[in-house]
Image (tube, grey):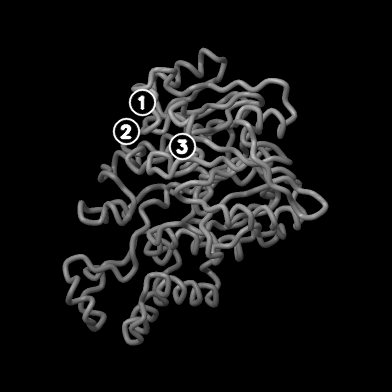
Amino acid sequence: MTHPLLVPHVSSEIGTLKAVVLHRPGKELERLTPQNLAELLFDDIPWVRKIQEEHDEFAKVLKDNGITVLYVKDLLQDVLKDEAIKEQFIIDLLKINGITNTETESYLKDYLMDLRCNDIAEIAISGLEKGDIDNIIPKGLAEFIYEEHYFYIKPVPNMYFTRDPGAMIDGGFMISSMKSAARKPETLIMKYIYKNHDIFKKNNVPCWYDNTYFHSLEGGDVLILSDKVIAVGCGERTTPQAIERLARNLFEGNSTVEHILVVQIPINRSYMHLDTVFTMVDKERFVFYPGIKKDLRVFSIIKDDKGFSIQKEKDLQDALKFALNLRNIEIIPTGGFNAITSAREQWNDSTNTLAIAPGKVITYSRNESSNKIMRKEGIEVIEIEGSELSRGRGGPRCMSMPLLRY
């Protein structure tokens, strides 16, 4: 599958969205149990049929607004049609899942090589349990010890949050280095798509960050505020060392980015990424969770003749004004100034808005107070159901990886 007219480029949070990458939740969520929820970064077990219905509604809203929707699984299938790429992907997939027993690795590799590309793409996301291929592979000690629920290839139920494992910045791509081992296979998938799919390969898209870098950096912490300014959250999932590495790569490359606002957020699961507390909805307007205002610290990394300089900023609002060269900044508090309502709706991703055009955003319908406030401020709000989608701790922005914005 080729997309000859699609040249990836994102230099705005609010420009008209033209193409996006999604993943439709699937069998990987059926692998969640009360015993592995914490390991796989979930707080509850979603109802799979319902979560698929909600995600399909999300995709329909995007398509109805003229946005090309691409799916991770389809893109991966495209690149696995090449036998050499398919073989190396299988080797890397087994390695990242800790398959080190030579005999087991050999059996699994042969088994997977005989499968069709779509089956391999499915397994890479939904996993491969012992029971799926019982009596085909000789049992090692691990299979006996963990007999009931032993995964040769672990599921990646967070894959529907496509924002995190990769992100377009200007005309280049960032392959995240994930904090949690449970999410590292997602970046392996993204890396194979980036390195081998025509969308990236034929357009000579540079790489600003790589998943082999030691320090963690995740896409939910990266906001593209303009062609020259990005904001990066520093908290539970993204380290200061990673942000400096990204800055160096952007400034030394051919990126137009000249200024990075580093927003230090509390290390807390409620605020796992910057976009769980702060997003841009219009040229001068941002939604913000007021409950963490006193805990924020803001720094600037600014490109200069020596590489870059770092300075501490007074506060987020003044830093945004200066960096974006705006006279006025409007901060819209999600949930209003009622602390209880604001905290409840932030937990349900009220701040995780996806702008599809200036002043036009997609949000969850359950965040009634925040949506009402945004509408009062003149923001066009498109609501989608998210009762099950939100159980994974992410909203419309988390569930989308923009490839092209005008």
Q: Is residue 202 visible?
A: yes
Secondary structure type for disc 2: loop
Gap in angstroms between the C-alphas marked 2 and 1: 8 Å
Q: Residue at x 54, y 67 (%)?
A: 212
Q: Give residue 280's position: percent from left, percent from top.
A: 58, 31
Q: Is residue 19 visible?
A: no
Of residues 146 and 4, the one drawn nearer to the viewer in this rendering: 146
**Residue that mark 2 sits on:** 387
Of residues 405 and 181, the one drawn nearer to the viewer in this rendering: 181
- The amino acid type found where label 1 is placed reads Arg
Q: Earlier in the sequence, mark 3 or mark 1?
A: 3
Mark 2 near mark 1, Cβ–Cβ under 8 Å? yes
Label annotation for residue 366? 1
Q: Residue at x 36, y 33 (%)?
A: 347
Q: Give residue 49's position: percent from left, percent from top.
A: 29, 42
Badge 3 density bin: few <14, some 14–19, many ≥20, Cα 10 Å? many
Badge 2 density bin: few <14, some 14–19, many ≥20, Cα 10 Å? some
Please state if 164 lies on the left or on the right of 319 as rendered.
left
Quadrant where the C terminus is found in the figure = top right
Q: Earlier in the sequence, mark 3 or mark 2?
A: 3
Of residues 228 and 215, the one drawn nearer to the viewer in this rendering: 215
Circle nearer the viewer, 3 or 1: 3
